[in-house]
Amino acid sequence: MAGLAALPQELSQDVVDLLNRTDLDPTAVVFDPIPPVVVTSNGGENGVVKKMKTGENGEREIVMGRNIHSSCLDITEPEANDEVTGDKEAYMAGILARYRQSLLERTKYHLGYPYNLDFDYGALSQLQHFSINNLGDPFIESNYGVHSRQFEVGVLDWFARLWEIEKDQYWGYITNCGTEGNLHGILVGREVFPDGILYASKESHYSIFKAARMYRMDCVKIDTLSSGEVDCADFRTKLLQNKDKPAIINVNIGTTVKGAVDDLDLVIQTLEECGFPHNRFYIHCDGALFGLMLPFVTRAPQVTFKKPIGSVSVSGHKFVGCPMPCGVQITRMDHINTLSSNVEYLASRDATIMGSRNGHAPIFMWYTLNRKGYRGFQKEVQKCLRNAHYLKDRLRDVGVSAMLNELSSTVVFERPRDEEFIRRWQLACQGEIAHVVVMPSVTIEKLDTFLDELVEKRLSWFNDGGNQPPCLASEMGKDNCACPLH
């Protein structure tokens, strides 16, 4: 064919043979090259991209992760005789074996993100051969028969008991992540109060502000105390400035960076004192991590639907320890009718955000909740709190600024000066602070290894006398700051 002369020379013989078929129109095949990866002018070494962000105290540097295009795994076409040689299978097996080894290595040095890596789901491997999909309402079966609704509703009932709401008074579902729970909770609040204003502390998870943008909601950021807890004095001031509109409030049951728990009772009291009756506000509780831990902390204030709250969400891949991202969202049945609609295609109803939902996640959660129960979770919470206090005390003993909120297992400390050290231990950082989230899979031995390495590194960071540890009094209070001034 004369037309082949204009085709790219790097085409394989298989593609050329394909184009020589008499039943194929070559003009219908597009050979536009893949757009090149854009390399920013301020890219750092190894693909690290650095951005500058301007804040109240001037500019600070945000260090972004490496560009994955430099290490991505290409997808290639199998050779014509691959079924005979098995080369492709062997190649992929090698890739997966090396990947598994890298996961084992990275898991050893995982401290900065709230994932419980202590789990064993070998008994559930027999279910991986099925495409389990819980599309639609979890309480109403659809025409798709390969689902796990019976497990999902069992999990939802367990959380309903935990948060003290009767079966006939709640609605909920297992989400694909904690962010989806927040998006759903804020959406329900917006549907109940279409003209409402969203109030959230400035230390709320970024998904709350994502929800405000997605739903085109007016959003008011509330100041926080040095602990990270919402400042209810500032909340009162801003409520009074908008008394003519209903209030939709995000209450943090553990902030992302400092692990601070907002005072739910004080938030409700502030609303009432500002003239907001219960039918003019909606409270969503973001309990991504601590929503499951707090019920097992002695004398901790409880999150319960006996209080005038509208919804609660938690993550399933954090304290529970599911191997895939998932979460639980519970709201009042009275509220959900504003979202729910019949779907003939499913022969069901749907008030979820996503259509298809991972049907394996409910089974993993059901399995863990059954194995551990309330007593098992209580033991794990106590272990996390003990180990968190151990880490905080050891940091202070070696002269590192450190803070631990009363109801938290998140230890906040001065940000390490070495980005490679941060990446090695997978620390989450914000400005001049970093944190370790002490989870059930974090042992004293792992904390000791981390501390030994940190102490050794600090000798090189501050050995000349010219460099001094930063003052973090504004971030964590004077009592927790170990700078030369304090």
Image (tube, rainbow, N blue to C red):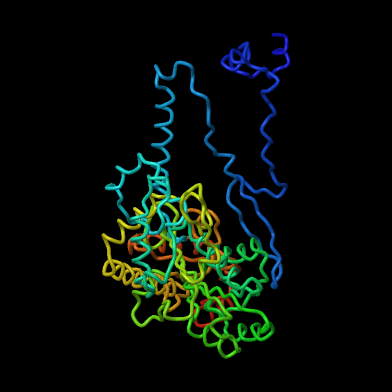
Instruction: Residue lying at the far bottom in this picture: please name it.
Output: 273
Classify the position of the N terminus by image quarter.
top right
Q: Could you tell me residue 247's position as x and y percent?
A: 61, 78
Q: In this rendered view, identify the residue nearer to me: 73 or 159.
A: 159
Query: At 52% from the left edge and 72% from the top edge, which residue is drawn?
Result: 284
Classify the position of the C terminus by image quarter.
bottom right
Tell me the quarter of the picture where residue 151 sits.
bottom left
Tell me the quarter of the picture where residue 429 sits.
bottom right
Query: At 38% from the left edge and 45% from the top edge, which residue is drawn?
Result: 145
Above or below: residue 364 compared with residue 337: above
Instruction: Residue lying at the far top in this picture: please name it.
Output: 1
Q: In this rendered view, identify the residue nearer to me: 370 or 68.
A: 370
Q: Is residue 352 visible?
A: yes
Tell me: 261 left or right of 280: left
Q: In this rendered view, identify the residue nearer to me: 176 or 330.
A: 330
Tell me: 389 left or right of 355: left
Q: Could you tell me residue 313's position as x and y percent?
A: 46, 66
Q: Could you tell me residue 355's position as x and y percent?
A: 51, 51
